[in-house]
Image (cartoon, rainbow, N blue to C red):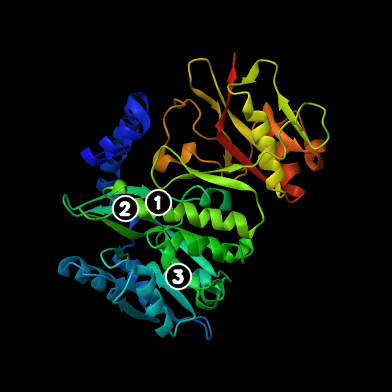
Amino acid sequence: MNTKRLTDYLGRNGLKSTCYAVLQHIKDRAEDVRYDRARASYTASGEELDRQRSHVWDEGCRPLISILVPVYKPKNEYFRQMLRSVRAQTYGSYELILGYGGGISENTNAALSEAKGDYIALLDQDDMIEPDALFYIAEEINKGARLIYTDEDKYDTGSGRYLRPFRKKGFDMELLLSNNYICHFLVIDRELVLEAGGFRSEYDGAQDHDLIIRCAERLDRNEIAHVDRILYHWRIHDESTAGDPAAKDYAHLAGKRAIEDHLKRCGMGGRVTETAHRGFYRVVYDDRARGSCVHGIKDYEMYLEPDISPEKDRSISDMAAYLAANKDVGAIGGRVVDRMGHIISSGYTEDTDGHLIPLYQGMNRNLSGKFHMASLRQEVSAVSRHCVMLRKETVDCMDTDTGRMCRKIKEKGYRIVIDPEHVFIRR
């Protein structure tokens, strides 16, 4: 955490929160060192790249991908490195289009207007992609995906090191309304982009976030694909938001407006606030459901073990307000912590064999986790039966086994969400 970020965070959040933020940063830096040393294991071998170059695609399965690069006073060295990374692609059916002369959305729209590809890919002028990036994108396109994103890391120009690997989860609209976790590398069906209205200059700084939300509103989940590979390198330098998130306040305000617009389009009452971390948001839903969620009321049912109680009185009614606004969510769980502030339960993910894996168990509640993911409302595979609110349609799914309860809920077609903002203490 550089001096600018530290000072900015301290001024907004106070000393205690800043101490925990520094501790989280120290943990992240330790992982950065391990990642940079082992980065070769994350990249394709020469043999694999040769295999991809010689791959014969079936007829009709070699889509043209238009790579759009908005350009504004690029540094020569960075720009050349970007170009070299594109020329090194093992998948050859692409075109590179540069847009310049205006703002970032205006430049990208100018490039879009010239695109001949079936899909567009978004690349910043000073970033880089791995040589196999388009190859894996094309594979997902051939499976029917219309919006594809990959994992990414950051490249520190000053040290020459690769840092902060971001291994993303599958598509999660809830998480997207908290932060543009999709970000880079992003490829979208060109017709879908045009249908959604292209890039909007009033959202410059968060124009990609705004576009992703509008496109995702039009897609089924099976049309959105995540490539579980680090294929994009986001350059950190003195002028980038990667190096100083406080440098572009307008971008954070644009992200907030993009989420507010989504709520309006979907007819959902609520307001958007920025969290302690710049560029991260929280939707606060309106009060229509407050007071209607006590044990025994038919619309929503809160299940709590006798030794667990909410830290804040509003938590239960806030959870009800969330369910009232999100009709496709069958269960919402709160974060359960012990008296020492360590996390007991904050949702579960599943391994490849279907076993539940607890998220952030044992972590201090004041830490935000990598990329602040531990602090954000998001979809999970399961929430604990010991602290869960169900809507009336899923009350019959309640079970003595957490996994069984959540499988029943998902079989009914509902999503399951964890909200770490709602803290419950086990006495």
Q: x, y percentage for residue 232?
A: 35, 61
Name the residue: 82% across, 31% down. 297
Quadrant of the rendering where the C terminus is positioned: top right
Left or right? Give the position of 221 relative to 74: right
Q: How many marks?
A: 3
Mark 1, Cα crowd under 10 Å, few <14 / some 14-19 / many 20+, is: many
Helix, strand or loop at disc 3? loop
Which amino acid, by three-letter code, is at mark 3?
A: Phe
* Residue in view at x 37 percent, y 79 percent: 111
State the image coordinates of residue 237 (x, y, percent, origin top left). Answer: 21, 54
Which comes before the other along the chain, label 2 or label 3?
3
- Left/right of residue 178 with respect to residue 125 in the rendered view: right
Between marks 3 and 1, how big is the CA–CA gap? 17 Å
Name the spot of residue 332 as percent of width and height, x first.
66, 38
Q: Quadrant of residue 27?
A: top left
| Residue 378 or residue 11, whichever sits in front | 11
Between the C-alphas of marks 2 and 1, the distance is 7 Å
Disc sitting over residue 310 in the figure: none
Compared with residue 155, is residue 132 higher up or lower down, i.e. above or below? below
Q: Which mark is on residue 248? A: 2
- Residue where numbered disc 3 is placed: 199
**Whether residue 320 is situated above or below residue 161 in the rendered picture:** above
Q: Can the viewer see residue 411 in this picture? A: yes
Q: Are marks 2 and 1 in contact (CB under 8 Å)?
A: yes
Confirm whether residue 170 shows in the render.
no
Of the residues shown, which amino acid type is indicated by label 2?
A: Lys
SS state under label 1:
helix
Type of amino acid at the residue the image marks with label 1: His
Give SS at disc 2: helix
Query: Quarter of the image containing the N terminus?
Result: top left
Q: Residue at x 40, y 85 (%)?
A: 114
Q: Which residue matches tag 1?
A: 252
